Amino acid sequence: MFKYYVIHNLEKYRKDRITSELTSNGVNMDDVTFINYPNKKDLTYKIKKKAVQKGIKIADGWIAVSYKHYLALKDIVENSYPYGVIIEDNVGRFVENIPNRLNLYLKQLPEDWDIVYNSDWISYQDIDEEEVIPEKIVYKKSNEITRDQNNEVIVHGGTKSAQFYMVNLKAARQLYENFLPFNHAPDMWMNELFRKIGINSYWAEPSLIVSYHSDKELKKIHVSSASTKSLFNKISYSNLKSKIINFFVGIKDF
């Protein structure tokens, strides 16, 4: 039912770790495709010319990872998969069976949903759009920039990073057909696309994943799920700026 894609940078420990996370949380690896190409060293002039908007300068790491997201969307469309789940290989830990949680999302989502984001970078409760209530696990997210009471940006649109999201075939086709050329990292670029083509974005709450915010944390394979959850539950909106900084530093690994 679900086709999974891992945005991968070829480091063995990352593949081993994400494979372990997926298999231990209910994912059959026969349903998983690793998007291994291109990496920074593979970015030819031809690829950059095709992928990046004219006159825009983007770090090679961002170009590589954004193009891999494009290739995942392309494969969903070309194979007519009803649901694609796109995962970056530094996503962190999952807190429960993945297919079970995805099926729960499908039961709660309206017919016109397009994409569902999972991340603990920020809570839906922090954006003041809809009341978070017990038993409800998916919430509509505006595609507009969300600001706090001091007019500072909280989130730039409908995305919630690009670590883990489920997209249906209709939306995958719309995104694929409009993805190139891009002008930013995948989540920031998709925010622009959502506003342009009218994608219906939803956020999962609570998050299915516990994020790692540095490559050092990612390598701590033997950290228990309980201690990891305890650590990241302490991270609140007040820490958002430092989390974002760590996220941007992490892109150098692609």
Image: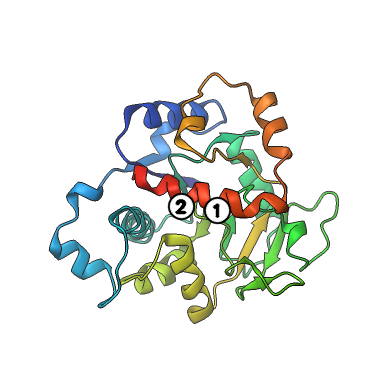
Q: In this view, does 149 lie above or below 187?
A: below
- Mark on residue 244? 1
Spot occupied by residue 227 in the image (x, y as percentages of width and height): 68, 25
To which quarter of the image does residue 147 belong? bottom right
Does 57 sit left or right of 172 as displayed?
Answer: left
* Residue 132 vs residue 230, the one in the foreground: 230
Vertical comparison of 159 with 103: above or below: below
Residue at left offset 72%, top offset 61%:
139
Indicate whether 23 appears above or below 194: above
Q: Which residue in the structure is indicated by mark 2?
A: 248
Dot 1 amino acid type: Ile
- Say which amino acid is labelled 2: Phe
Q: Is there CB contact under 8 Å for labels 1 and 2?
A: yes
| Residue 29 in the image: above or below residue 83 | above
Q: Please count the marks in the image.
A: 2
Residue reaching furthest to the bottom = 196
Quarter where residue 47 is shown: bottom left
| x and y, in percent, of residue 145 in the image | 61, 74
The quadrant in which the C terminus is found is top left
Residue 204: x and y in percent read 67, 53
SS type, badge 2:
helix
Q: What's the mark number on residue 111?
A: none
Q: Residue at x 38, y 26 (%)?
A: 13
| Furthest-top residue in this view | 222
**Depth order, front residue of 90/246:** 246
